[in-house]
Image: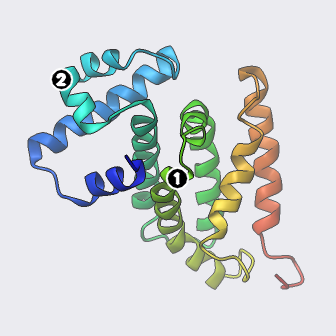
Amino acid sequence: MDTSVHLGAIMDRPLRKDAADRRSALLRAAREVFAEEGIDAPLDRIAERAGVGRATLYRNFPGRTEIALAVLLDDVADLGERYAAPTAPDAFLDFIVDLSERLVRNTALGGVVRAAPSPDILTPLRAAMVKAAAPALKVSQAAGTVRADLQGSDIRVLAAMLGAGLHNATPAERNAIARRTLEFVLDAVRRSPGGAA
């Protein structure tokens, strides 16, 4: 089954309130369980923490990849809400900092999603990230804070840069790598002092 099609269908149709509440509880539980026990934690533990049965978990998320992607999508949706109507000239730079922090927090989840058998599974996440970044990019470009040649689709490149060094980093070195990578990315997107892209 094409997982990206399945996930798109789930995300597009509105859920009844009780179903939406159960899904939110599952996402919250997944985030907590993965943070406490690691990405290989038993999925039954997520259902138990959410107060639902296994059937409910698997009806919402057929497997580990799907639940990891859903947690990441939920994080990106939160970013989108946070930066939906920015006014500060540095909005896009703030967006990048926030994105970097989330990538560090979700390194293991990102690894599961990247290892999925079909690259199409990343399509909804990429589209959500472009949409989330667009308002901040527009404001910062209008203010002359970031490069004029940046496009919404470049957020995929920037996210890849921010996350690339984290994948095989030990927990001890992860924060240092994230900070240094963030410095490079922020320098890359800022408008040069002379005003050129």
Q: Nearer the viewer, residue 8 or 78?
A: 8
Residue drawn at (50%, 73%) of the image: 135
As drawn, which residue projects farthest toward the right?
194
Residue 52, label in figure: 2
Q: Nearer the viewer, residue 110 or 104?
A: 110
What is the tally of numbered marks visible in this picture?
2
Rendered image quadrant of residue 164: top right
- Say left or right for 74 vs 175: left
Mark 2 closeness class: few <14, some 14–19, many ≥20 residues within 10 Å: some
Q: Is residue 81 above or below residue 180?
A: below
- Say left or right for 38 vs 166: left
Q: Secondary structure at mark 2?
A: loop
Give, as a three-letter code, the residue at label 1. Answer: Leu
Tell me, yes or no, whether the two marked residues, 2 and 1, touch with CB atoms within 8 Å. no
Q: Secondary structure at mark 1?
A: helix
The residue that label 1 is drawn on is: 122
Q: Earlier in the sequence, mark 2 or mark 1?
A: 2
